[in-house]
């Protein structure tokens, strides 16, 4: 699915990709032909993209099909259309194309637009006491012993310190609900700072690896990463994590971290698994392309790319629920954290 007008979601994806830490090398070569730019994009992905085997894509066929309409005299608009069509074959939400200003931005979006959102933010305040912490996240107590906080992204800075203020404000509590619905990702460092406030011991939670050769299955070794304790008063009790199809990228890596922590229940819908650590590549004529860099797996070697992490408790919102201002996903989480679920 192509978006030519920078919708809010696409802009959020663009911001998340930039927040992860990308590289650009500006060029200015207006005389470079559309064919040469197309070939550079194809070759860059052929050499670096880590998920051809996972996504079962014939990249050579994609090149032949979508290069055919171009000529040395093709316009920026014709090049943008050809590159968009080729990149969308990958069905990867981290892959993106930024054209010159009048052409806009494109990224694959069927992974969330074709599925129910299972979230209606306007219903959340009805379940909460007044916001109990001065932080830039919706938060409060659902019951005397259960607190709620919604991280709608990990883009930005200061997440760990803000989470400290929240935990201090709601203490003491026996259960915690972390709502990740709609979290398109952001910075792993910020997500790690939050997860560090939820443990008293360091632990590993994932492995990542990079392409290191010309073949699509050429990879370097798996590199393990983990969470270090942070903050003065971590919360060590049970956690319910609310998920939907729109949890992506660092939001899903955060889920892996919490699952490795233990005493965590996922409630809601299966996110669209996508991990990438992407970089932006600058091209002639004002084009940029976003290229994923790694594969990510849990400590058992399971790569959820394109499949997602199934919830422990699958719960959905109906149209009737939304009309009534109800959130069965949140309600189920409260039940699970109560003394008598």
Image: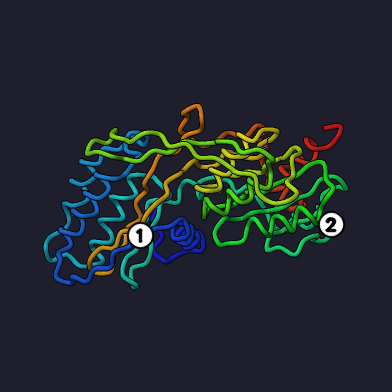
Q: Position of residue 190 (x, y in %)?
A: 57, 54
**Above/below status of 4 relative to 39:** below
Residue at the disc numbered 2: 129
How is the structure coloured here? rainbow
Q: Which residue is at 27% across, 47% downward?
A: 45
The count of marks equals 2
Left or right of residue 196: residue 54: left
Within 10 Å of disc 1 (Cα), the crowding (few <14, some 14-19, many 20+) is few
Of helix, strand and loop, which one carries label 2?
loop
Q: Nearer the viewer, residue 248 or 198?
A: 198
Q: Is residue 105 visible?
A: yes
Q: Position of residue 116 (x, y in %)?
A: 58, 46
* Mark positioned earlier in the residue sequence (1 or 2): 1
Residue at the disc numbered 1: 23
Q: Is residue 305 visible?
A: no
Left or right of residue 215: residue 244: right
Of helix, strand and loop, which one carries label 1?
loop
Within 10 Å of disc 2 (Cα), the crowding (few <14, some 14-19, many 20+) is some
């Amino acid at each position: 699915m192509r978006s030519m007008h920078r919708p809010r979601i696409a802009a959020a994806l663009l911001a998340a990709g930039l927040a992860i830490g990308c590289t650009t090398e500006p060029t200015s070569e207006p005389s470079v032909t559309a064919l040469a730019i197309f070939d550079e994009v194809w070759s860059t992905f052929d050499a670096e993209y880590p998920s051809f085997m996972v996504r079962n894509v014939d990249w050579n066929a994609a090149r032949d099909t979508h290069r055919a309409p171009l000529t040395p005299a093709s316009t920026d608009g014709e090049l943008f259309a050809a590159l968009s069509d080729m990149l969308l074959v990958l069905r990867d939400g981290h892959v993106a194309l930024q054209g010159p200003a009048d052409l806009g931005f494109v990224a694959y979006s069927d992974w969330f637009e074709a599925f129910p959102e299972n979230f209606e933010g306007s219903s959340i305040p009805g379940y909460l006491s007044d916001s109990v912490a001065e932080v830039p996240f919706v938060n409060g107590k659902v019951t005397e012993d259960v607190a709620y906080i919604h991280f709608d992204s990990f883009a930005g800075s200061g997440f760990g310190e803000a989470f400290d203020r929240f935990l201090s404000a709601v203490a003491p509590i026996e259960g915690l609900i972390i709502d990740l619905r709609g979290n398109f990702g952001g910075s792993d460092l910020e997500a790690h700072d939050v997860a560090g406030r939820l443990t008293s011991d360091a632990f590993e939670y994932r492995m990542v690896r990079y392409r290191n050769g010309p073949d699509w299955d050429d990879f370097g070794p798996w590199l393990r990463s983990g969470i270090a304790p942070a903050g003065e008063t971590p919360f060590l009790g049970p956690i319910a994590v609310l998920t939907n199809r729109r949890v992506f990228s660092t939001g899903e890596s955060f889920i892996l971290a919490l699952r490795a922590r233990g005493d965590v229940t996922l409630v809601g819908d299966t996110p669209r698994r996508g991990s990438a650590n992407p970089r932006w590549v600058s091209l002639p004529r004002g084009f940029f392309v976003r290229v994923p860099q790694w594969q990510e797996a849990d400590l058992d070697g399971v790569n959820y790319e394109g499949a997602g992490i199934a919830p422990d408790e699958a719960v959905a919102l109906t149209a009737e629920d939304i009309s009534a201002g109800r959130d069965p996903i949140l309600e189920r989480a409260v039940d699970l954290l109560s003394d008598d679920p």
